[in-house]
Amino acid sequence: MMESVKCLIVGSGPAGFTAAIYTSRANLQPVLYEGIQPGGQLTTTTEIENFPGYPEGVDGTQLMADLKQQAQRFGADIRFGIITRVDLSSRPFHVVVDGEKEIEAETLIVATGATAKYLGLPSESKYKGMGVSACATCDGFFYRKKDVAVVGGGDTACEEATYLASLCRQVYLIVRKPFLRASKAMQQRVLGTPNIKVLFEHNTAEVLGDENGVTGARLRHNDGTEQTIDISGFFLAIGHHPNTELFADQLALDEEGYIRTEPGTSKTSVEGVFAAGDVQDPHYRQAITAAGSGCKAALDCERFLLSQTK
Ligand code: NDP
């Protein structure tokens, strides 16, 4: 028999778990599927020092385990599994889990997050979490007074390079084109910061390291010449892609594939479907903003269900 749920949450980052805490407390008996990466992107970082309420910082995996436990305490049904198909053409929505189990959901909260892009080098994955990071705001602090590199030429790369320059001794910005794509203001800030060295027309051939983590990078200029830089941190800022493949053609997405929401709310283009966290936010991408938007989605969902029973 097909299972029917009032509120189905997809994704287990801070947005998904916060939505689960609120909807379970509102007695909507939410079911949450954790997805491909249980705990989301925060489980790929180490210490989180900017999540309010943890004066000594908190381990990313621990924070996610705590959020999960908090949701379960109020009765949220959290399950391991991946949503493989959704049909949002009529309500209740039809959802398939792991290619076989079918669920009917009165409402859906999409919190599937985004994935940072990496270059795809074997040496880069080898040192992930050991000096290779895609989040300077999360991990930059650990590189105080050290030398680091940032890859990318957009606003994120420039912002991260500027942030790191305030902490680190030397920041190399590795840009594959002969120019920066970032806004003029960001470009000027980067070019005017004395401890940022922009290496135009360079690509990374290899991340170098030892048993303690990253020690350098081998760079290749577009003319074929190579050089090695000594660094302890290697930061990727080459963009993110939202995890919205499941919803393409069903929800309104922006040009980059992020779910469009009605400004100030979590409402998507389909009534009864709400979006929270990085999947609808190309700008802030913080754990706390994701958690906040998960709360909004839960409240919007609760109000929607109430309006249906009137
Ligand atoms: P962008 O897509 O704007 O920039 C990505 C950068 O990474 C580009 O310079 C690109 O190079 C480079 N890149 C991509 N793939 C590779 C690769 N394989 N190897 C080397 N370099 C690579 O992403 P952002 O995350 O910077 O920005 C996303 C959006 O968010 C933008 O619209 C941006 O304006 C916005 N934003 C705004 C901010 C603000 O206003 N304060 C702050 C942060 C982001 P190339 O140029 O050659 O394609």
Image (spheres, rainbow, N blue to C red):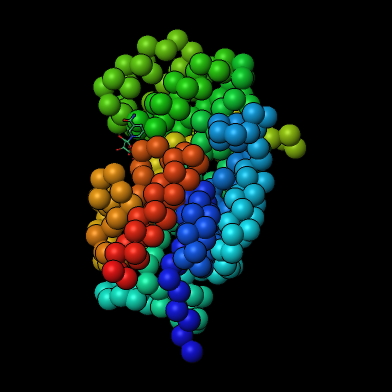
Q: Looking at the image, which residue is at 32% across and 16% down?
A: 188
Ligand 1 position by quadrant: top left
Above or below residue 284? Residue 62 is below
Q: Quadrant of residue 212?
A: top right
The x, y position of residue 132, in whole percent, is 58, 37
Q: Looking at the image, which residue is at 45% across and 79% down?
A: 4
In this view, the residue in front, 48 or 26, is: 26
Tell me if I can see residue 20 in this picture: no
The x, y position of residue 283, in whole percent, is 36, 38
Q: Quadrant of residue 52?
A: top right
In this view, the residue in front, 80 or 16, is: 16
Q: Is 266 placed left or right of 117 in the picture?
A: left
Q: Is 88 placed left or right of 290 in the picture?
A: left
In this view, the residue in front, 267 or 286, is: 267
Tell me if I can see residue 190 in this picture: yes
Q: Quadrant of residue 200?
A: top left
The x, y position of residue 257, in whole percent, is 31, 53
Q: Looking at the image, which residue is at 69% across and 35% down?
A: 213
Q: How many marks?
A: 0
Above or below residue 193? Residue 172 is below
Above or below residue 219? Residue 90 is below
In the image as oriented, which residue stretches furthest toward the front? Answer: 310
